[in-house]
Amino acid sequence: MKLIINILIIGLFGSTVLNADYYDYNSSYTKAEGYEKYRVILSTPITETVTKKVYAGDEIRDRLVKRRVPCGGERDMNTIGIDTIIGAGIGLAVGNKIGKGHGREAARVIGGLSGGYIANQMRNGYGDCYEDYTVQERTPRYETITEEVITGYNNCIEIDGKRLCKESKEKKKFLRIKKTYSIY
């Protein structure tokens, strides 16, 4: 029983202490909150140093290139001339000397066809003739620059002779300040 009475006394005393913010022993008061708008008197930029690569144009270099060209005369790819027949005959003779036994027939055929092809290509003007020409190579060129970038603003107001500042992404014309009022 004594325990229950102590709990009740502590409970009543505790609730009085918890409500002490809102009630005085002699009078009661209420809290109110509101916002006030103040004109910003100073906005200073907040900067950060940034290093980045920037395209600065192309670097152009000339490079010498060789390309295969006809050695002369007109191109005649579809006719067989006397030079092709002579080339095939020489290739046949070389194949006959190289091959032995049953491989001799295959060596003759391969030699004849190869000799005819080589002779025909030479007649058509494709030997070892090359021409030099210039090609321009473009390589992108980048430069590294360092610059100051604005990352935000420090906006300041003055209240009762005290300066208060708040950071934001952009410049502000006004700042809202939350105030709590106690009414007695």
Image: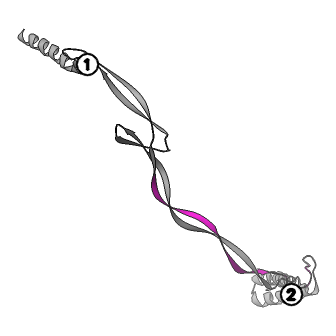
Using a 10 Å C-alpha cutoff, classify the residue at mark 2 as few (fewer than 14 neighbours), some (14 to 19) or many (20 or more). Answer: many
Q: Is residue 51 left or right of residue 19?
A: right
Q: Which residue is mark 1?
A: 22
User: Which residues are drawn in magenta?
Assistant: 46-75
Q: Nearer the viewer, residue 48 or 122?
A: 48
Q: Main secondary structure of the magenta part?
A: strand
Using a 10 Å C-alpha cutoff, classify the residue at mark 1 as few (fewer than 14 neighbours), some (14 to 19) or many (20 or more). Answer: few
Q: Quadrant of residue 95?
A: bottom right
Q: In the rendered view of the protein, which quadrant contains the C terminus?
A: top left
Query: Which mark identifies residue 59?
Result: none
Instruction: Say which residue appears at 83% left-offset and 86% top-offset.
Output: 92
Q: Which residue is mark 2?
A: 87
Q: Position of residue 147 (x, y in %)?
A: 50, 61
Q: In the rendered view of the protein, which quadrant contains the N terminus?
A: top left
Q: Position of residue 16 (x, y in %)?
A: 19, 16
Instruction: Say which residue appears at 23% left-offset and 14% top-offset.
Output: 27
At label 1, which amino acid type do we have?
A: Tyr
Which colour assignment does the render follow?
one colour
Instruction: Say which residue appears at 34% left-offset and 27% top-offset.
Output: 180
At label 2, which amino acid type do we have?
A: Gly
Does 108 appear above or below 12?
below
Nearer to us of marks 1 and 2 is 1
Q: Nearer the viewer, residue 148 or 91?
A: 148
Q: Quadrant of residue 122?
A: bottom right
